[in-house]
Amino acid sequence: MTRIIDVEIYGQRYAIAGDDGDDAYIRRLANFVDDQMKNLAEGMKTTTPSKLAVLTAINLAHRLFEAEKKRAQGEADVERRMATLMESIDEQMPTSLFR
């Protein structure tokens, strides 16, 4: 069942719809965004909350893209290692076993 969870991000209250049991997770997400906005705001002299929200979203999107790139590189590394191991095993196995 969908419920409404009230959170506060950068001094603004938001009502977010979530399923039962999502309260802690949604609050955790909201706290993370709030922390990111506050940290970014510390390095700025003046800004509006909407501009700060957009800059925070850009920073988070960048982090997401970098994590995806690292995950893809890790997968490619695993695939290369697996292929190398399979080739090594094939070279070590006597071919008479497969006839």
Image (tube, rainbow, N blue to C red):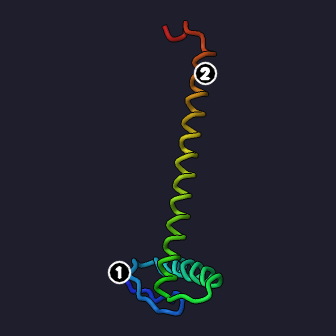
Local packing at callout 2 (Cα closer than 10 Å; few below 14, some 14-19, many 20+) is: few
Disc 2 from disc 1: Cα separation: 53 Å
The residue labelled by disc 1 is 2
Q: Relative to 13, is 72 above or below?
A: above
The spot of residue 55 in percent (x, y) is: 51, 76
Q: Amino acid at mark 2?
A: Ile
SS type, badge 2: helix
Q: Amino acid at mark 1?
A: Thr
Q: Residue at x 52, y 87 (%)?
A: 9
The spot of residue 99 in percent (x, y) is: 48, 7
Q: Relative to 59, is 37 above or below?
A: below
SS type, badge 1: strand
The numbered mark, 2 or 1, whose residue comes first in the sequence reads 1
Q: Residue at x 57, y 22 (%)?
A: 87
Local packing at callout 1 (Cα closer than 10 Å; few below 14, some 14-19, many 20+) is: few
Instruction: Depth check: give the residue in front, 75 or 98.
Output: 75
Label for residue 77? none
The residue labelled by disc 2 is 89
Q: Residue at x 60, y 14 (%)?
A: 93
Image depth: mark 2 or mark 1 in front: 2
The spot of residue 11 in percent (x, y) is: 53, 93
Instruction: Depth check: give the residue in front, 59 or 87.
Output: 59
Instruction: Depth check: give the residue in front, 40 or 77.
Output: 40
Q: Relative to 82, is 69 above or below?
A: below
Q: Is residue 93 left or right of residue 1?
A: right
